[in-house]
Image (cartoon, rainbow, N blue to C red):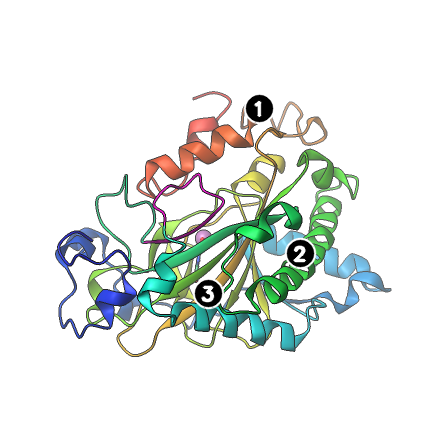
């Protein structure tokens, strides 16, 4: 952001610029083609989790397995997280990004190893082109290790966000059991692979952009973690790649979007897919999204389980620690889209 002297994008975006700074302009071959988004292909599956604990248990497990295999993405309703909790977390995020610049900057850092930080774009130390996004990112499991680092403004941030984190973790643990079961593994199989578990959360803020055709909120990428639970406000922006085409995932109030991350792709030995997705921006409205990134702890060893390996299905990946994987992810600057190729068993 050197040309403008501002550290955060929001403070540039709202200064009345009519043209985006050149650092945000993508080469012509790498632009979002916003008119070429496929709405007619339908959206990602919407799964009702209400049936997970009843007589329809196996049907729901089947739907989850199908979605993980086919789309790598699904939406969930009746997920157990109260509507009020969803709206106050979105509200807190919105309030946070409206705080005066000096107040927001208290949390600023461009060091990806910091466990609580506000930053912009993706990784400004390594990337060539910037992305149209500010984000607050923080660790949230175990809560008591991190909550004291979180912003204390808005005043209810720590209390309310902590409650939300706990609830989302409960949802993740249920989904991990269901996903293990759908792979024919013991229900606690994935849970046990994660060491002491990790949970990170981001609040993404995408300001309105005067030239949304030239840039991304986030360019195409897969999530490096295990599984992501995304909450978005009512402004569209998320797109998912299906059969080579970008599909818009338009918001449905009070649902979450779930996507398989790279670590489930490895733990399923490629049966389940960590799918490319991206966020585009628009010239009208700012947009908030709140992903929870559930992950193994850095020392957890990840690799295809012997239960899913045989002569016809050899191990696609070597064993690695999640710490090793995660470091590669941040350093490559979202340029190579996905790190999985670097961890293949035979490359
Ligand atoms: C992410 C992500 C999508 C969005 O933060 O990894 O994919 O809609 N976000 O903000
Ligand atoms: Ni993502």
Where is residue 76 drawn, in percent x and y?
63, 66
- Disc 2: which residue: 64
Q: Is residue 112 magenta?
A: yes
**Rendering quarter of residue 13:** bottom left
- Disc 1: which residue: 319
Q: Nearer the viewer, residue 39 or 122?
A: 122
**Rendering quarter of residue 180:** top right
Mark 1 vs mark 2: in front:
1
Is the shortest distance between ligand 1 and the CB of mark 3 under 8 Å?
A: yes
Label ID, residue 17: none
**Rendering quarter of residue 97:** bottom left
What are the residue bounds of the magenta stretch?
109-120
Is there a contact, CB below 8 Å, between mark 1 and mark 2? no
Which quadrant of the frame does ligand 1 lie within?
Answer: bottom left
Q: Nearer the viewer, residue 198 or 183?
A: 198
Residues packed near mark 1 inside 10 Å, few (<14), some (14 to 19) or many (20 plus): some
Residues packed near mark 2 inside 10 Å, few (<14), some (14 to 19) or many (20 plus): many
Residue positioned 53% across, 51% down in the render: 149
In the figure, is residue 304 to the left or right of 261? right
Q: Secondary structure at mark 3?
A: strand
Q: Earlier in the sequence, mark 1 or mark 3?
A: 3
Is there a contact, CB below 8 Å, between mark 1 and mark 3? no
Q: Is residue 69 above or below residue 212?
A: above
Distance of label 3 from label 2 (alpha carbons): 23 Å
- Disc 3: which residue: 289
In the figure, is residue 218 to the left or right of 264? left
Where is residue 163 drawn, in percent x and y?
66, 63
């Amino acid at each position: 952001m050197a040309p403008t002297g501002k550290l955060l994008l929001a403070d540039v975006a709202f200064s009345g610029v009519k043209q985006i700074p050149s650092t945000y302009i993508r080469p012509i071959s790498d632009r979002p083609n916003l008119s070429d988004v496929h709405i007619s292909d339908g959206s990602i599956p919407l799964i009702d989790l209400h049936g997970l604990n009843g007589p329809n248990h196996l049907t729901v497990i089947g739907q989850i397995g199908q979605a993980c295999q086919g789309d790598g993405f699904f939406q969930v309703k009746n997920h157990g997280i109260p509507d009020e909790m969803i709206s106050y977390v979105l509200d807190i995020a919105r309030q946070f990004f409206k705080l005066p610049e000096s107040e927001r900057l208290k949390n600023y850092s461009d060091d990806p190893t910091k466990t609580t930080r506000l930053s912009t774009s993706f990784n400004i130390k390594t990337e060539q082109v910037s992305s149209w996004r500010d984000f607050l990112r923080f660790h949230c499991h175990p809560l008591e290790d991190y909550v004291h680092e979180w912003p204390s403004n808005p005043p209810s941030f720590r209390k309310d966000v902590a409650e939300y984190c706990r609830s989302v973790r409960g949802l993740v643990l249920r989904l991990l059991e269901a996903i293990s079961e759908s792979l024919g593994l013991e229900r606690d199989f994935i849970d046990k692979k994660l060491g002491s578990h990790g949970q990170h959360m981001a609040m993404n803020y995408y300001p309105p952009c005067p030239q949304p055709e030239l840039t991304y909120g986030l360019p195409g990428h897969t999530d490096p973690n295990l599984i992501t639970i995304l909450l978005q406000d009512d402004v569209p922006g998320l797109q998912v790649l299906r059969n080579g085409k970008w599909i818009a995932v338009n918001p449905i109030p009070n649902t979450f979007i779930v996507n398989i991350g790279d670590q489930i792709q490895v733990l399923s030995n490629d049966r389940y897919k960590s799918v490319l997705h991206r966020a585009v921006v628009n010239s009208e409205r700012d947009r908030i999204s709140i992903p929870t990134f559930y992950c193994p702890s850095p020392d957890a060893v990840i690799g295809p389980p012997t239960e899913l390996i045989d002569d016809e299905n050899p191990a696609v990946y070597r064993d690695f620690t999640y710490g090793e994987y995660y470091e590669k992810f941040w350093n490559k600057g979202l340029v190579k889209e996905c790190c999985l190729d670097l961890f293949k068993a035979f490359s």
